[in-house]
Amino acid sequence: MAGAAFFDLDRTLLRGASGPLITEALQAAGLVSERTLPAQQAIYRLFDIVGENLPSIGLARAAAMAAKGWSFDTMREAGKAAAENLEGLVAPYAKPIIAEHKAAGRPIVLATTTPEALVRPLADLLGFDDVVATMYEHADGVLTGALAGGFVWSRGKLDAVRAWAASNGVDLDESYAYSDSIYDAPLLNAVGHPFAVNPDPRLQLFASVRRWPVLHFDVPAGVPKVMRVEPADILKLGARPELFPYARFDIGGVERIPKDGPAIVVANHRSYFDTVALGLTVLKAGRSPRFLGKKEVFDAPVVGQLATALGGIRVDRGTGSAEPLKKAAEAIEGGEIVALMPQGTIPRGAAFFDPVLKGRYGAARLAAMTGAPVIPIGLWGTEKVWPRSERVPRVWNILRPPHITVRVGKPVALDRTDEDADTEAIMRALMNLLPAEARKQRTPSEEELRLATPANATKN
């Protein structure tokens, strides 16, 4: 027998609780009074902070009796009305995992305590194969106030999943389960592939002891979170140019970086310090950049782990693999900002002084795949902080720190069907953001050539 994939709803598949949006739909349908909302909203807020708790489960358990006398059809229509809004709460990185299970031929099942009539429309909208959920009894189209079957929570959820698996020829030992709650530990224990997703504190500890994988569907794989905080959130608080006393930053046009939603940020490449300048600029806009970077960065001690923790996307040049662009597209689909340098590597020697920037197709191809806006950022002076010829930045240069200019441009107008033309347009936009001296052809001095050449010229 084959396995299936079971997904919990609140704080697992969704980024928070479904209750507020479902309650709004029930209120709009005339099934819920406004007088009941304040207490419910307080419980929902508690749920969002600490995860599933006894007050929220008590509310869910009492809901069947409170619904006595409701029209079942009206309740179902409220579920349909809520589905579209709930879809907007789906955690972005849940979708690729769902797609992987579908590609493997596994049934995708929503397993939740929330009443089946209220969540099946969402499951249908997301392409789930079935729903295991609490069923409300109804007679002649009216809810009786009783349950039709057990309460699908904790051991009750496991019992319901086992019954579903037996009816559908599914082997739980071959199955996957995803949940945030310690109360779903029985279900997670019962499957061959358990995953703690955005786990509450108790499940976090339990998963550590059992060595279960811990995931967060709202950030890329490899990005850790503690109490819903990721490393990039901490960097936002401390992303101040003053922390780099060996450089002076002049950053302009930050308002052109979208405050929310997907975007592709591109910059020219002059130094290993470009990542710092570009990162500071995007963080200053209140966003967390996901960098596309060479594998050498990810293989480096400490720096590599940090790059992964910040949601970096590894690029192994020369393999021709489409995986990095696929992961970047997934990040953009999740509303993220992906940052890359179309030149691919820092020009060396005489090429460093060429006023015409030459780029690779990655940014143009990603823009065509996703439709996301491409925001150009011109960098100048970073090579004075960290020359190409040196292995470390000049952190000792604090008395006369070099001046770094960062300019954010308007979104690049792209055709999105012609990679050559779009790459040229992106590189022109970057050149236009650089100072006039960058666009003049000149002969560099021997010292300038030395600084622009790696210490070991056989390596990039």
Image: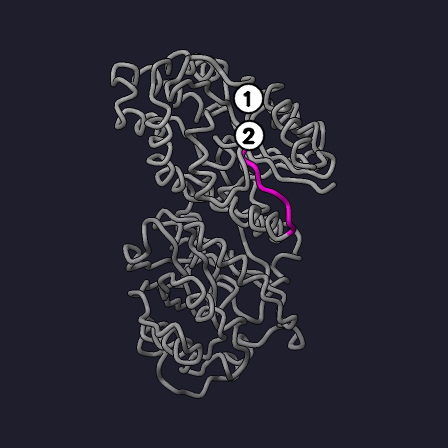
Q: Position of residue 310 (x, y in %)?
A: 53, 48
Q: State the residue at coordinates (33%, 30%).
A: 78
Q: Which mark is residue 239?
A: none
Q: Position of residue 115 (x, y in %)?
A: 46, 25
Q: State the residue at coordinates (32%, 62%).
A: 408
Q: Is residue 378 magenta?
A: no
Q: Amino acid at mark 1?
A: Val
- Whether residues under marks 1 and 2 lie with C-beta atoms below 8 angstroms apart, the answer is yes
Q: How busy is the neighbourhood of tag 1: few (under 14 within 10 Å), some, or many (20 plus)?
A: many
Q: Position of residue 366 (x, y in %)?
A: 46, 66
**From the viewer's perspective, is 161 left or right of 127?**
right
The quadrant the C terminus occupies is bottom right
Q: Which mark is residue 152?
A: 1
Q: Provide the secondary structure element on which disc 2 rests.
A: strand
| Up/down of 199 relative to 42, above or below | below
Q: Nearer the viewer, residue 114 or 393?
A: 114
Q: Amino acid at mark 2?
A: Val
Please tell me in which quadrant of the rendered image residue 252 appears: bottom left
Residue that carries the numbered disc 2 in the rendered image: 132
Residue numbers of the magenta segment: 104-110
Q: Position of residue 276 (x, y in %)?
A: 47, 56
The quadrant the N terminus occupies is top right
| Up/down of 446 relative to 217, above or below | below
Q: How busy is the neighbourhood of tag 2: few (under 14 within 10 Å), some, or many (20 plus)?
A: many
Please tell me in which quadrant of the rendered image residue 423 appears: bottom left
Q: Nearer the viewer, residue 265 or 303?
A: 265
